[in-house]
Amino acid sequence: MKPFLYMALLVTLLTTSGCWDRTEINDLAFIMGTAFDVTEDGNYILSHQIAIPSSAQGGPGSGVSSKEKFFVISAVGSNINEAFYRLQKKSSRRLFTAHRVVIYIGEKLSKRGIKDILDIYTHDSKQRLRTYIMVVKGGEGRELLKVKYPFEQVPSEAIKEMEGLRSELAISLRDFFLASSGEGISPVLGVIMADGITEGVKEGNIFKLAGSAIFKDFKLAGFLNENETNGFLWVTDRMKNGSLNANVPDSSGTVGMILAKTDRKITPEISGDKIKFNIQLHGEGNIWENNTNLDIRKPENLRIVETALEKAVEGQIHDTLSKVQKQYKVDSVGFGREIYRDKPKQWRTLKNQWDNKFPEVTVSLEVKLTILGSGMAGPPLHLERKEIIK
């Protein structure tokens, strides 16, 4: 029986197909970041930040400095598909998107509209929906791709680390699609800009997260600054950790708090044509800075500090809602979604007129902060005993 078994195995090996369509890693160009911009005549500019493999750095006759870890290539097309294939003609390797970290969209293109850009990511199964997508404030995405970041070999990797800290708004393609296709909410994007640059961006500067971008009908409606974005994170239940600062009345100083835990609850109330939302926010954390003359180890002084911090949060929420309701008039906070979830029958009536209703809704806000400990932030050490309020 053994000879027949050996013959059967041999036939199996000869007739079994191998990985005939396998692509070797040396044949791939790893795209780490992508940028979309627009020309003066309305064409698209597509740019890729591509990692340079170590085997290609500094070799004899390579012409590549061993210090260079990435390069940026761009192409122009009347549509995204045309621009992509023109980029492929500039690369000796197949462009590979599975490792892409971030997609930048220039501010000018964001104002014109990004619907065509998003369409390509709904058809190509190779695109990663966990890729971060951001608006470049005051500049073009292709220029930001050239900005080097000292901590990472390829700058786009820094975005993954920065967004992972959740210090600002972190939005992926998946998040954007869920919001844009959901009921009662308009999508937002994170914002990035080169630090210290007011007119465009230049190579050699680091970049920073810079608030959030409000979209309406896939067009940029405007921006929220850092303070307003913090309020946005609170009201949308995305404030997982962070910091607060507040001026304390009658103490000539400020206090700072590190948040360890947050919670949010929204309850819609509908009475005839009047719509009201009751928002309850709760946060816990520790004092990490005390520039007042209060000894916050004392319960009565600790309550003074808590009240000042609560008012600071109320101010952030007020600034945020004022901008999205009165100025941009777009429900990015998801009030409509809360009605859709809690009162689906009323939502069916309100849905088609929500754009007009949203700016007129009223909000009741209740903020409760609990300071778990003051740590070493008791009375400032540089004050004399007689200057400290106990």
Image: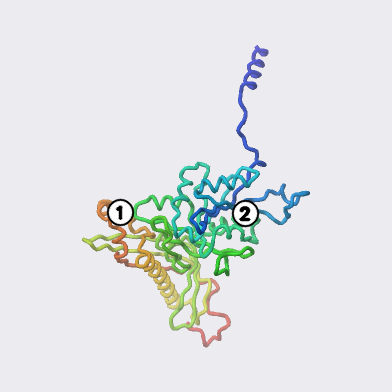
Residue 86 location (% of width, % of height): 58, 47
Residue 338 location, quadrant: bottom left
Q: Are marks 1 and 2 in contact (CB under 8 Å)?
A: no
Crowd rating for badge 1 (residues with CA inside 10 Å; few <14, some 14–19, many 20+): some
**Which residue is label 2 attached to?**
72
Residue 39 location (% of width, % of height): 52, 57
The residue positioned farthest toward the top in the image shown: 1
The amino acid pointed to by label 1 is Asp
Disc 1 to disc 2, how far (Cα)?
48 Å
Front one among 166 and 296: 166
Residue 278 location (% of width, % of height): 32, 64
Looking at the picture, does residue 9 appear above or below residue 251? above
SS class, disc 1: helix
**Which residue is label 1 attached to?**
342
The amino acid pointed to by label 2 is Val
The reply to whether residue 101 is in sight is: no
Q: Which mark is residue 43?
A: none
Q: Tally the numbered discs.
A: 2
Residue 143 location, quadrant: bottom right
Residue at 61 percent across and 42 percent down: it is 94
The residue positioned farthest toward the right in the image shown: 60
SS class, disc 2: strand
Query: Which colouring convention does the figure follow?
Result: rainbow
The reply to whether residue 146 is in sight is: yes
**Quadrant location, the N terminus:** top right
Residue 59 location (% of width, % of height): 76, 49
